[in-house]
Image: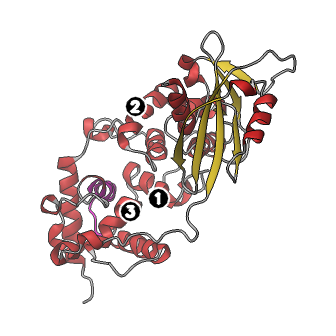
Amino acid sequence: MPRTAKPDAALTAALTAWFERAVRPLPWRTDFASPASPRDPYHNLVAEAMAQQTQLSRVIPSYERFIERYPTVAALASADEADVLALWSGLGYYRRARSLHAAARAVMAEHGGSLPRTAEALATLPGVGRYTAGSLASIVFGERTPLVDGNVTRVLLRIEGRDDLLEPRPIAEFAWSRATELVGHARKPGRFNEGLMELGATICAAPPAKPDCPRCPVNRWCKAFAEGSQSRIPAPKKARPGGTPTVYCATLVARDKAGRFMLEQRLATGMWSNMWQCPTLEREQPISPSELRSFAQMRSLDPASLAKVGWLTHQTTHRTVAFDVYTATAVVCRRKQSAARWVARDEFSTVGISNAQLKVIRLATSK
């Protein structure tokens, strides 16, 4: 049956009205707090960068600290990358912080200090993909352009009852096409787009949680609700062939008499690039005792002092990182340790430390 404009217009109106009633008071939604306070494009760019793959409960305090330190795009552009990474600690996915910093510099250098107003122009900024460009262009600047993230995709698949889409590319093509159709009928494109995301985040939940269909403002248009197929949509993702690769790490947690931790900076490329960590040996295979002792000596740590305190795993986007955690004692060494520094726990916010290393340190100091 051909799609008509009337149902789409009614759906978008219902979702927009629901969102304006149920909107959560997030700090970057200044236009809801006061009609006289329009959205700040830069603040929304920061919020979007932080919210990707991160729980909102963790985003809000980090966002507020970040905006307090870097209230304008000019302030962020002039900052040192190491300071930006340090302030980002705890959010993970540090490539987002680097891209945000690079985008701020591009805005200053190429756009006169003002963020572009269209999705096409926004997408030229470092780290700004199709979703973020659509979000800023529609929500902040009112452009009639779609946005699609995981929440939006799930909502649209269920509304259309698409349990037949199994592969990422067809799913993405469907979601962008349907989102484009719907935003074309929305009276308030930005509010509608934000409502789609909010619906997926709060009501049309992802498995294993169950969607709260009776409370959904668009359930009358939802084929999955009508057919009782919500739990099957979207279809479970196929397992990666061969499984997720594992990186094996042995981390040595050493403290001086003042309680400070020995930290060293990672290389400028690869996983957690330029971040600070306790001395860590990485291998594609489990680490042998002889390798561990040699590594300790290279870091001016006493091999005889090594004591295993536990292990943990940390999941990144593409791999599992398995940590064996040891405490160690530093020895007097005349060789200059140019890559290492001693940092107190209350100074961690001044250096960039990954979530994985923070978990390692907590494990080592809880014994």
Q: Please name the amino acid that badge 2 sits on.
A: Pro
- From the top left corner, tell me how far across and down residue 190 is, in percent: 34, 55
Q: Residue furthest top?
A: 258
Q: Residue at x 24, y 77 (%)?
A: 5
Residues at marks 3 and 2, CA–CA distance in whole angstroms? 31 Å
Read off the magenta span: 185-200
Q: Is residue 34 magenta?
A: no
- From the top left corner, tell me how far across and down residue 122 is, in percent: 54, 54
Q: Residues within 10 Å of mark 2 (few under 14, many from 20)?
A: few
User: How many circles with numbers are drawn on the protein?
Assistant: 3
Where 318 sits versus 55, above or below? below
The residue singled out by tag 3 in the image is 144
Residues at marks 3 and 1, CA–CA distance in whole angstroms? 13 Å
- From the top left corner, tell me how far across and down residue 276 is, in percent: 65, 32
* Residue 327 vs residue 343, the one in the foreground: 327
Identify the mark nearer the N-term, 1 or 2: 2
- From the top left corner, tell me how far across and down residue 225 is, in percent: 18, 72
Q: Please name the amino acid that badge 1 sits on.
A: Tyr
What main secondary structure does the magenta stretch of the protein show?
helix
Callout 1: SS: helix
Residues at marks 1 and 2, CA–CA distance in whole angstroms? 23 Å
* Residue 316 vs residue 122, the one in the foreground: 316
Task: Give the left or right position of residue 104, taking residue 54 as reference.
Answer: right
User: Which mark, residue 131?
Assistant: 1
Callout 3: SS: loop
The mark closer to the camera, 1 or 2, is: 2
Q: Please name the amino acid that badge 3 sits on.
A: Arg
The residue singled out by tag 2 in the image is 61
